[in-house]
Each structure stands twice: as C-alpha cells, then as structure tokens.
Image (cartoon, helix red, strand yellow):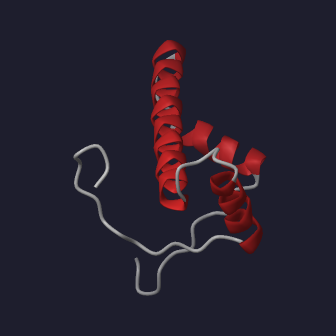
Amino acid sequence: MVNGMASTKITITLDDDQVQQVRNLVNAGRAASVSGFVQHAVGVALDDVAGWGAMLAQALDESGGPMSVDERAWADKALGVPKPRKRAGAA
C-alpha cells in the first residue's frame, strides 16, 4: 500500500538499461525502491497528460473550438498521419 491507497501489483517490461539506471538510483539512495520510482514516474506522466489536456482545451477555447473536418484532414496530411483503414465488411 502507498499512502493508504489500494494498490495493484502488475508486470511491466522495460529495457535492461532502464532497469539498471533505476537500480543505480535506488543503490545511490536517490530513489526509495524500484516500485517507488516507477509509481512516481507514472504519477508524473499522468499529471503531464492532464496538463497537456487542460492546455489543449484552453487553446481550443481561445481559438474558436475544435478543428473542423477539413482542418483535421489538412493537419493529418501535413503530419503524415495515415488514413484509417476501413474494416472488412464495413459499408
């Protein structure tokens, strides 16, 4: 348990170099544990995603709202986003 919150044990896959770097931080006393480091990293990533979402919402609000279909098509083309493939049997 962390801070009295329920927790779930999961398995993740990391590059060997990343695991060694985290273990080095733990051994140097710069992180409490591998699990603690990963929990912190996930928290930071989730906060980052939430922050970007809030900034995007504000930018959309200030610029006139969500992109139109034409604007989205232009942006996808400019960014090289492939067109979604139609599923078999879809009309």
Residue closer to the observer: 33 or 17: 33
Image location of residue 60, percent across then percent down: 50, 23
**Relative vertical location of residue 10 with respect to residue 75 in this rendering, above or below:** below
Asked whether the viewer can see residue 67, the reply is no
Q: Residue furthest bottom?
A: 89
**Relative vertical location of residue 35 with respect to residue 41 in this rendering, above or below:** below
Indicate left or right for 78 with 47 as reference.
right
Image location of residue 9, percent across then percent down: 35, 69
**Relative vertical location of residue 55 with respect to residue 12 in this rendering, above or below:** above
The quadrant where residue 83 appears: bottom right
Indicate left or right for 40 with 28 as reference.
left
Residue closer to the observer: 63 or 68: 63
Give the quadrant of the N terminus: bottom left
User: What residue is shown at x 40% (from left), y 77% (from top)?
Assistant: 91
Residue closer to the observer: 67 or 14: 14
Image location of residue 64, percent across then percent down: 49, 18
Asked whether the viewer can see residue 19, the reply is yes
Indicate left or right for 17 with 45 as reference.
right
User: What residue is shown at x 45% (from left), y 26% (from top)?
Assistant: 54
Indicate left or right for 74 with 37 as reference.
right
User: What residue is shown at x 47% (from left), y 19% (from top)?
Assistant: 58
User: What residue is shown at x 22% (from left), y 46% (from top)?
Assistant: 4
